[in-house]
């Protein structure tokens, strides 16, 4: 089932109102930005450590409380134009090239796109993406239990069951090395014998990554991002990263799009 931008817009918040992330108001949530040109003035969304059953979208799952020591991004609902631009910049409609050996055409294969949203809020970007692209798998990483539950509820409400099978919402800490481990590394440190070998990971599976974090938040995860890029380059696997509002200073964008009427807020595309 495919939902138009107009239908998803009805799920959008009043972007002129920034509320606390701890509220139970179901119209509050989401990643990205609105047309507020000073996103640092909005309420901060907090990331902290937690453990959650992998790929579990069960709303009854117990989620961890906040740890205010790890603050990576402001809570600032994304506007529809920013969302639309991001999905159009990503190569979501075609397979990604995978080659195990450099310059060896015999080892070239293709991988269906996998989109990770780092700090996914209420998953509005991922819901739009998984609705539009039939072969796309999406993973939302979010710490705030209010938004983890809200994202899962929206997926269950908006998406057909067959589409829900392609989107996962996880509670986790982006500054925790475990978040960036490969399946092999996770298995070595996981005492759970029921560990899911099909569990999608940033290190193994991400072809597209969406980031909307403050500069300090980006700096905290840069070692992991650089490690991920190095891994992709070694394996000749393509990777696309979009940063919304704040660019990734260590990297050179291949494209920059203005995504606010004032021209202040921008979306940056990086390709490796």
Image (cartoon, rainbow, N blue to C red):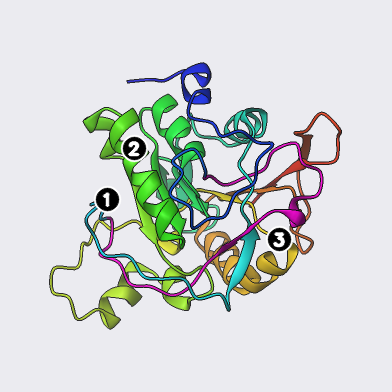
Look at the numbered disc 1 and give the secondary structure of its residue: loop
Q: Residues within 10 Å of mark 1 (few under 14, many from 20)?
A: many
Point out the tag, 1 or 2, that comes first from the N-terminus: 1
Give the magenta range. Answer: 29-55
Residue beneath disc 1:
57
Q: Is residue 205 visible?
A: no
User: Which mark, by number, is residue 214?
Assistant: 3
Q: CA distance from mark 3 to mark 1?
A: 27 Å
Look at the numbered disc 2 and give the secondary structure of its residue: helix
Write the residue at 31% across / 40% down.
166
Residue beneath disc 2:
155
Write the residue at 39% across / 53% down.
148
Q: CA distance from mark 2 to mark 3?
A: 27 Å
Point out the tag, 3 or 1, that comes first from the N-terminus: 1
Residue 157 relative to residue 215: left or right: left
Q: Within the magenta stretch, is there residue 253?
A: no
Look at the numbered disc 3 and give the secondary structure of its residue: loop
């Amino acid at each position: 089932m495919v939902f138009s931008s107009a239908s998803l817009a009805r799920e959008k918040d009043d972007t002129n109102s920034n509320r606390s992330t701890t509220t139970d108001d179901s119209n509050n949530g989401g990643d990205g930005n609105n047309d507020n040109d000073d996103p640092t003035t909005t309420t901060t969304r907090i990331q902290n450590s937690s453990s959650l059953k992998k790929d579990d979208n069960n709303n009854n799952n117990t989620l961890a409380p906040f740890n205010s020591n790890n603050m990576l991004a402001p809570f600032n609902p994304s506007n529809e134009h920013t969302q639309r631009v991001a999905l159009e910049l990503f190569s979501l409609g075609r397979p990604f090239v995978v080659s195990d050996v450099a310059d060896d055409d015999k080892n070239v294969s293709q991988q269906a796109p996998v989109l990770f949203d780092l700090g996914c809020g209420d998953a509005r970007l991922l819901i739009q993406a998984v609705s539009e692209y039939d072969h796309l798998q999406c993973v939302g990483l979010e710490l705030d239990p209010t938004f983890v539950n809200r994202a899962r509820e929206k997926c269950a409400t908006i998406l057909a069951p067959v589409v829900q099978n392609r989107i996962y919402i996880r509670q986790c800490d982006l500054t925790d090395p475990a978040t960036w481990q490969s399946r092999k590394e996770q298995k070595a440190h996981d005492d759970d014998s029921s560990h899911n070998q099909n569990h999608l990971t940033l290190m193994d599976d991400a072809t597209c990554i969406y980031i909307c974090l403050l500069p300090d938040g980006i700096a905290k995860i840069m070692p992991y991002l650089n490690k991920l890029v190095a891994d992709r380059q070694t394996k000749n696997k393509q990777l696309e990263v979009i940063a919304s509002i704040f660019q990734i200073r260590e990297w050179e964008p291949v494209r920059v799009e203005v995504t606010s009427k004032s021209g202040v807020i921008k979306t940056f595309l990086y390709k490796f």
